[in-house]
Image (spheres, rainbow, N blue to C red):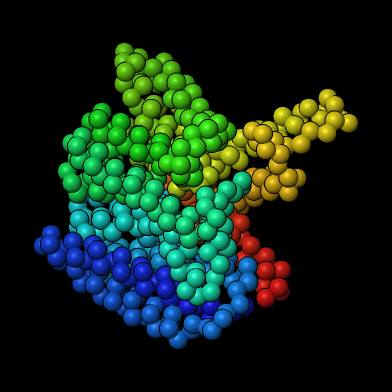
Amino acid sequence: MHPRVIASAIGAVVVVAGLLMLVPGVFALFAGEDTFAAFAVPAAGAIAAGAAVFYFSRAQDPYVSAQDVFLIVTLGWIGVASVGSLPYVLTGLMTPVEAFFEAMAGFTTTGATTVARPEEVASSLLLWRSMSQWTGGIGIVLLFVAVGPLVGIGAAQLLSAEVANPVPERLTPRIRDTAKTLAIIYLSLTTGGIVTLFLVGMSFFDAVNHALTTVATGGYSTRADSIGAFDSWPIELAITAGMLLSGLNFSLYFFASQKQLNRVFKNPEIRAYLGIAAVGTAVMTLSLYAFDYHDSPVTAFREALFQTVSLLTGTAFSSADWNAWGPLSHGLLILFMAIGGCAGSTSGGLKIIRVVLLASIVRQQIFHMLHPQAVTPLKLQDRTLSERLRLSVLGFFIIYVLTLVAGTLIIAAHQVPLADAFGSVFACVNITGTFLGPVGTAEFYAGLPASAKLTLTVFMLLGRLELLTVLVILVPAFWREY
């Protein structure tokens, strides 16, 4: 282990977290709220402490191992969530455990919350919630890439640990240039979202908050009834478009900007993603029209489109009480949450590319049963994939299922009903924050024991870092190799 390298990296990340906290602090001053100190004090402390740790632990020509990278990434998320929880505690809004739960749900873009009535919370705290999701979407990835060279860590190592893409593809030869490209895409989507939402009728404050949480596919809202509170089709369409765009692999925007349109239109993941969204919306519309909205196919389509895209991307905004829908609609929503968006996006779930590869593997195995001697390499479009990648996809799926099983049993041990225990773990691992029944409501999460809340924050982190980055730390061989 190289504690100096790890400490200096975490120190730098904490400094940036403190600087970000100044934004809602300044907003509180202009808004005339009494929450300025709740931001300024922890911000000053984080900046001072982080800078001191970074300065005194920085090593000359440090050696960095893969184990160091995994620890830095995992501890970095825990660090920013810890710092980010302080304003909630200092304002008296939450207990320390609830505040850490809220902050982790924000930075991991899970969107789970213990706040039942956002309208009654100070605007500066709502802005901080939205900023935490926006930062956690891809901002923290860029942060790690920027911090890496300062402490001698390869940016490519950090990026691969943060964004686990089953079929990785670097956009530019230099990883720092790739990070800049991602930042431009992310900022462009955010700016476009703010302008669009303001033009279709949101107040500027609401537009900023919802644009931040839409591009991050996080789902925090300034209203208890989420997007349904606005009761506006133009707003729903604007947010649907934002969620759909944010669920795409960000590399496709780069290829489009370089006029490499063939790489966009022929990409199997984007075709599967849009196909699932389109077919899912159609089937959901039929289900809602048949069982819920008998007299209004337009309402059925409106609700189906929004909720399909919202849960497929893991954003989990709601425009209707979908808990009141029929069993078929519920089954589809659960399926969308599990599938998730594209790799290289801010979405959660298994990711579209893994689902495509799993389907290919199933077809391959069925073919082998009929033709045992046949040699059929796994292919993605015109690209032959290695056996290692095949095993990686299968291994991830097995770990995903085992994580859900283990998590369900752990939460059930807190005397939570089995269905709700599964739903809460499912919501956290897939970073949607919501599920059927009471799961996903502020009352449900607020009513959990402190130990259950802390356990769910672990599953949020597992889901955000795609399981393996965190789980590898728990393997004894990880520590023996130090």
What residue is at 69 percent from the left and 46 percent from the top? 389
Locate residue 442 relative to residue 161 in the image: left or right: left
Residue at the image position 52 percent from the left and 52 percent from the top: 172
Picture coordinates of residue 395, whole percent (x, y): 69, 48
Residue at image location 61% in from the left, 56% down from the top? 468
Query: Residue most toward the right?
Result: 373
Which residue is the extreme one toward the bottom?
A: 56
Q: How many numbered marks appear?
A: 0
In percent of width and height, residue 230 lies at: 22, 36
In the depicted structure, whether residue 482 falls above or below residue 126 = below
Picture layout, residue 302 above or below residue 159: above
Q: Residue furthest front?
A: 259
Query: Going 53% across and 64% down the picture, which residue do you hit?
Result: 155
The image quadrant of residue 366 is: top right
Q: Position of residue 470 (x, y in %)?
A: 57, 61
Q: Which image quarter is the N terminus in? A: bottom right
Q: Is residue 147 shown to the viewer in this render?
A: yes
Q: Compare residues 105 and 5 and report the one nearer the observer.
A: 5
Nearest to the observer: residue 228 or residue 206: 206
Is residue 331 visible in this depiction of the protein?
no
Query: Quadrant location of the C terminus?
Result: bottom right
| Residue 26 position by quadrant | bottom left
The relative height of residue 401 versus residue 319 in the rendered view (above or below) is below
On the image, which quarter does residue 233 sit in? top left
User: In the image shown, does 400 or 107 lie closer to the viewer?
Assistant: 107
Is residue 202 left or right of 171 when viewed as pictured?
Answer: left
Provide residue 35's location: percent of width, then percent of height: 19, 66
